[in-house]
Amino acid sequence: MTGINDHKNHHHHQNQTSDNKTPLTTPFIISNNLAATAMNSAAQQRAQPHNIGSFRNTLTWFILATCVLYILYSSNLILSAGLRHHICPDTADDANQVVRDLQTLSSNFSSSSSSYDDEETFSLEGKRHVKEGNDNTATELKHVVFGIAASSKLWDKRKEYIKVWWRPKETRGVVWMDKKVRTSWRDQAWLPEIRISSDTSRFKYTNRQGQRSAVRISRVVSETLRLGLKDVRWFVMGDDDTVFVVDNLIRVLNKYDHTQFYYVGSSSESHVQNIYFSYGMAYGGGGFAISYPLAKELEKMQDRCIQRYPGLYGSDDRMQACMAELGVPLTREPGFHQLHHLGYFPRTTRVKALQRLFQSVKLDSASIMQQAICYDKRRAWSISISCGYVVQILRGVLSPRELEMPTRTFLNWYPRADYTAYAFNTRPVTKHPCQKPYVFYMNTVRYDPSKREMIGVYSRDRRYRNPYCRWKMESPEKIDSVVVLKRPDPLRWEKSPRRDCCRVLPSNRKSTMYLWVGSCRGGEISEL
C-alpha cells in the first residue's frame, strides 16, 4: 500500500507543475520560434550571399538558441529531481547537491542493511532464502548449548541434580560459577565444564529484596555465546537445580526455525508471581531457550540494557526487559515448568528420587509424567496414572474433568495466597476419609523386547495408612502393587495432543492390579 500512495503523490506534483505553466510546456514554444527564425535567415543568405551582417546575426541566434536549450535541459533535470523528492531547487548547484545527497543516503542504507544480508536474503514475494552455510536439517542435541547458573555455596548439593540429566560426551554446555570450587576428577567426568563469570561490579543493582548475583546470572547466555562454540542453534539457560529432560527439549525446539529470533519458555504456575513480575517473562527456574541469531543480537546490547534496569529483582526479568527492547515476545511452551521440589518418593532423598524417575525417562521420555485415566467399573474406583511416577486409586467415580485438575498438595510462591493464586485450575485436598487416594509410587521399570513394552511396578508405602472409611464398597486397601504395561511412543510429541487411554486388565492376584496404557482405539473414551 505504501507504493500505491507514493505513486499517487508523484502524479499529484506533475499536475501542479503543468497547471502553473512552468518549463514543462515552455520548451516546445521556444523551439518552434527558433526553427522559424532559422528558415528566414537561410532565405536572406541565398538572396544576399555576401551579407556578412546577416551571417553574424544568424550565428548569434544559433549560439543563443544553444544556450537556451542547455538551460532548459538543466531545468528539466532539476524539475524531475524536485518531483522525486518534493523539492524545487532553483539552481544547477542545488540539483547537483540533491544528487550527491541521494548517493550518500543510498550508500548508508546499503551499509546498514549489509549485516542482515550476511544472514539471509529475501525475494520480492517475501520468502526467505537461507544462504549457504545454514543447515535446515532437524535440530539434534549436538546443536544445543546449555548455560547453567550456579552458586559456589550450593554446588556440593546442586551438582548431583545435574548428574541426573547430563549426558557426558553428548550434551554441550558450561556451568557459570561466582568463584572457584573444588571438583573431584570423578565428578568432572559427569559434569559440564565449570567457568567463572566475569566481574559485574560496574553494573548498578538497587533492588533491596533481591541479590546482586542476578546481574551475573542474567549474562550467562551472552558469556556462553562469547566462547565461540561451533554449530550452535540454541542456547538453553537454567539454574543448577533445573532438571532437563533433554529428549523432550529437542522435540520442542524442532518446532521452531532456529534461524529466526525465538525466546522460548513459560510463565510461572503462580498467578501472584506472574502479576508481580510479568506474564511475558520466561522464568529461569523452569529454564528457557534462545535461538542463536537472537543470542547474537542480545550480546551486542545486553550490557547497556542491564544498566537501564538496576531496580529489577532477578536475572530472568532483566532478560525479559532486554527482549522487550529487542521487540521479541515470549513464545510459551508449557513444558518449561517452574514448579520446585520435584521428584518426591517416600523414604529416599531427592537425588535418589530423581534417579528413580529417570529410569522411566530413559525408556519413554516422551510420555514421562503424562496422565492417563481409567475406571474399575466393577468396584467403582477411579484411577489416575502419572506415567513413570505415580498411580492413584480413589473410591467412587470422579469425572475426567475433575481428575485432570491437580490437587493442591504444593505451596504457592507466595505462601499466604489461596488457591485462586494459581495460574491453572486446582482442586482441594479432600477431607473426607473415604475419598483419600491410595498412592502407589513407581518402584521398578524394565523393557520387554519380546512384547516391545515397558513393565512398571508401582508400590504403596505401607508406613502411611489411609484413615478408616465406613463405606461398604470394596477398598483399595487390599492392593499392594500396580503393574502398568505400556509401549514407548517416541512420536507422541509429533501428534495432536491427546491423553492416553487406560484399561483395567484381569488379574488372578487380589493384591495386584494390572493396567494397560496406550493410544486410544477408535471410539474409545474415558467413560464413567
Image (cartoon, grey):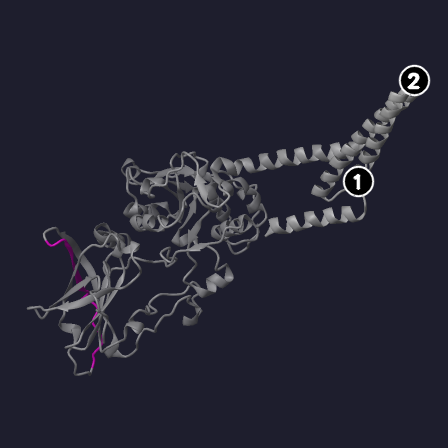
Relative image position of residue 201 (x, y in whole percent): 54, 41
State the SS at label 2.
helix
The three-letter code of the residue at mark 2 reads Ile
Q: For this view, does 335 lie left or right of residue 93?
A: left
The region drawn magenta spans 451-469
Give me the C-alpha separation between circle 1 and circle 2: 35 Å
Residue tagged 2? 52
Residue tagged 1? 23
The three-letter code of the residue at mark 1 reads Pro
| Labels 1 and 2 touching (C-beta < 8 A) | no
Q: Residue at x 57, y 41 (%)?
A: 202
What number is the disc on residue 50? Answer: none
Q: Nearer the viewer, residue 297 or 77?
A: 77
Mark 1 vs mark 2: give the one in front.
2
Q: Relative to 501, does residue 84 appear above or below in the rendering? A: above
Q: Nearer the viewer, residue 73 or 279?
A: 73
Task: Give neighbour class at mark 1: few <14, some 14-19, many 20+ (Cα, 10 Å).
Answer: some
Relative image position of residue 401 (x, y in whole percent): 31, 73
Q: Nearer the viewer, residue 126 or 274?
A: 126
Q: Relative to 416, does residue 494 appear above or below in the rendering? A: above
Question: Is residue 341 on the magenta stretch?
Answer: no
Count every numbered label the image shows and give the total. 2
Relative image position of residue 73 (x, y in whole percent): 76, 33
Q: For this view, does 48 lie left or right of residue 239?
A: right
Of the numbered discs 1 and 2, the one sitting upstream in the chain is 1
